Image: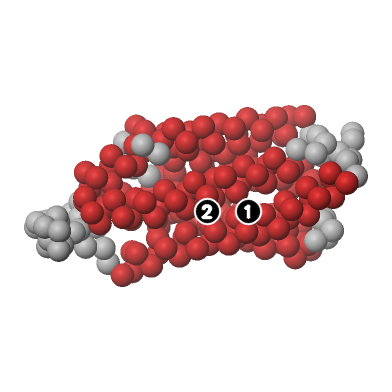
Amino acid sequence: MAFIDELTFVMITLILVAATVGYIVVAELYAYWRSGPKGLGTALRETAVPMVALGLVVLIIGFWGMFTWPLPGAYNLLFFDIYTLFGLIVLGFGLSVYLGFRLQYVGVLSLVSGGIVIAYGARAYQLGLTSTPWAMFLMYLGWGATAILAFPVAVIADGWLRGGAAGAPAVEPAKGKDGLPRYPVSYLRAAIVLFFVLVIVLSALATGGILANAVFTHLKSPP
């Protein structure tokens, strides 16, 4: 079967998800600091639509690729197995936010999937399945690490949403200079959340490098 040039759009959706999730995480950290669990819950629910929309697009393309096998040989397994898992995770987070479910349960799925992504990338590197094996491995490593880190971030978000020892303080927080309360965020939790954002940004940059090469190559000489 001839090579079909849909991988460029696949990588575009990865970058879109990275940009959306990175922005959401930073915005939710700020929302909790400013408004506590209530403000965080309101802000999170507003993210359900883009997350569900992106998750559906990714999942549909993933299942289509798994059922039709448009790529040569093992490349279908390398790309579409992982891409379908990615769609399930993004859609799961979006639905969990919309329905008010705990995020950590989808986080467990993300944690396990992250290990699978790294294993696929490592094996693809060993077999030399791409013309740029190091770049491909770094992309898989980055997205695998992102999926793994999504679990502790989800646990932290659950704690903030539900208050108590894991999240919001039991007493009224101190007020800032503007007279509004400021909900304290521990340095450890903030570091984990911001490290997650850094990793997803680096993953997007690695994906963007491969995407740029693919776009320039395919536009010049379509497969």
Question: Do residues under tags 2 and 1 come within 8 Å of each other at their CB atoms?
Answer: yes
Quadrant where the C terminus lies?
top right
Mark yes or no: residue 11 visible.
yes
- At mark 1, the secondary structure is helix
Estimate the x, y position of residue 29 in percent, counting from the top left.
33, 55
Say which residue label 2 marks.
147
Q: What's the mark number on residue 100?
A: none
Quadrant where the N terminus lies?
top right
Mark yes or no: residue 173 visible.
no
Q: Which residue lies furthest to the bottom in this view?
A: 187
Residue sitting nearer the eye, 179 or 139: 179
Kind of residue at badge 1: Val
Residue 5, image quadrant: top right
Q: In this view, does 176 lie to the left or right of 75?
A: left
Q: In this view, does 102 lie to the left or right of 222?
A: left
Vertical order, 63 against 198 (above or below): above
Label 2 Cα neighbours within 10 Å, binned few <14 / some 14-19 / many ≥20: many
Label 1 Cα neighbours within 10 Å, binned few <14 / some 14-19 / many ≥20: many
Residue for point 54% across, 50% down: 18
Estimate the x, y position of residue 158 in percent, counting from the top left.
31, 49
Q: How many marks?
A: 2
Q: Earlier in the sequence, mark 2 or mark 1?
A: 1
Say which residue label 1 marks.
117
Kind of residue at badge 2: Ala
- At mark 2, the secondary structure is helix
In whole angstroms, how far apart are the C-alphas of marks 2 and 1? Answer: 9 Å
Residue 177, image quadrant: bottom left
Residue sitting nearer the eye, 67 or 17: 17
Estimate the x, y position of residue 130 in percent, counting from the top left.
82, 56
Residue sitting nearer the eye, 201 or 80: 201
Residue for point 73% across, 29% down: 67
Residue for point 47% across, 38% down: 51
